[in-house]
Image: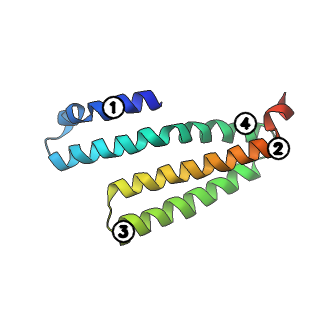
């Protein structure tokens, strides 16, 4: 996922011209894809860890982590940084990346605390 996103980020000036000739949009496309490139490992971790913890019989922890991530980090991050402080679209994607990073850290903590992989084996 990260490699494909990095390729898209590097090619965004040319790929973006297929869809628009607006330089602002093409510039934002490059910035957003670079932000997304750095947040992809966290997204992959969250996707896998959510499934592992749920398969281990605990659906409550992933639900609580998702509620905290989406409603606190994403929603407040977008509201404060994009709307109130005026950082725009990059702030939205940074908030999404921060949400995924927080959730990945919480799942890593849970994995280390509960030994989920060993319990499933």
- Give residue 89's position: percent from left, percent from top: 33, 55
- Residue neighbourhood size for the residue with mark 1, other residues' Cα within 10 Å, grouped as few (<14), some (14–19), many (≥20): some
- Give residue 119's position: percent from left, percent from top: 86, 34
| Residue in view at x 84 percent, y 32 percent | 118
- Residue neighbourhood size for the residue with mark 4, other residues' Cα within 10 Å, grouped as few (<14), some (14–19), many (≥20): some
Which label belongs to residue 83?
3
| Residue in view at x 13 percent, y 41 percent | 21
Residue for badge 2: 114
> How many numbered dots are placed on residues in this image?
4
| Residue in view at x 32 percent, y 67 percent | 86
On-image quarter of the C terminus: top right
Between the residue at mark 2 and the residue at mark 1, the CA separation in whole angstroms equals 37 Å
First reached walking from the N terminus: tag 4 or tag 3: 4
The secondary structure type at the circle numbered 1 is helix
First reached walking from the N terminus: tag 2 or tag 3: 3
Which label belongs to residue 52?
4
What colour-coding does the image apply?
A: rainbow
The secondary structure type at the circle numbered 4 is helix
Left or right, 109 with reference to 26: right
Residue for badge 1: 8
- Give residue 107's position: percent from left, percent from top: 69, 46
The secondary structure type at the circle numbered 2 is helix
First reached walking from the N terminus: tag 4 or tag 2: 4
Disc 2 or disc 3, which is closer to the eye?
2
First reached walking from the N terminus: tag 4 or tag 1: 1
Left or right, 65 with reference to 38: right
First reached walking from the N terminus: tag 2 or tag 1: 1
Left or right, 63 with reference to 39: right
Between the residue at mark 4 and the residue at mark 3, the CA separation in whole angstroms equals 36 Å
The secondary structure type at the circle numbered 3 is helix
């Amino acid at each position: 996922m990260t490699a494909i996103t990095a390729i898209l980020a590097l090619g965004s000036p040319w790929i973006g011209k297929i869809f628009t000739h607006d330089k602002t949009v093409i510039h934002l496309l490059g910035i957003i894809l670079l932000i997304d490139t750095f947040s992809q490992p966290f997204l992959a971790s969250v996707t896998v860890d959510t499934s592992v913890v749920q398969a281990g019989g605990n659906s409550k922890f992933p639900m609580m982590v998702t509620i905290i991530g989406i409603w606190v980090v994403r929603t407040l991050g977008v509201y404060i940084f994009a709307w109130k402080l005026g950082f725009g679209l990059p702030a939205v994607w940074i908030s999404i990346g921060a949400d995924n990073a927080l959730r990945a850290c919480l799942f890593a903590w849970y994995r280390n605390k509960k030994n989920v992989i060993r319990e499933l084996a």
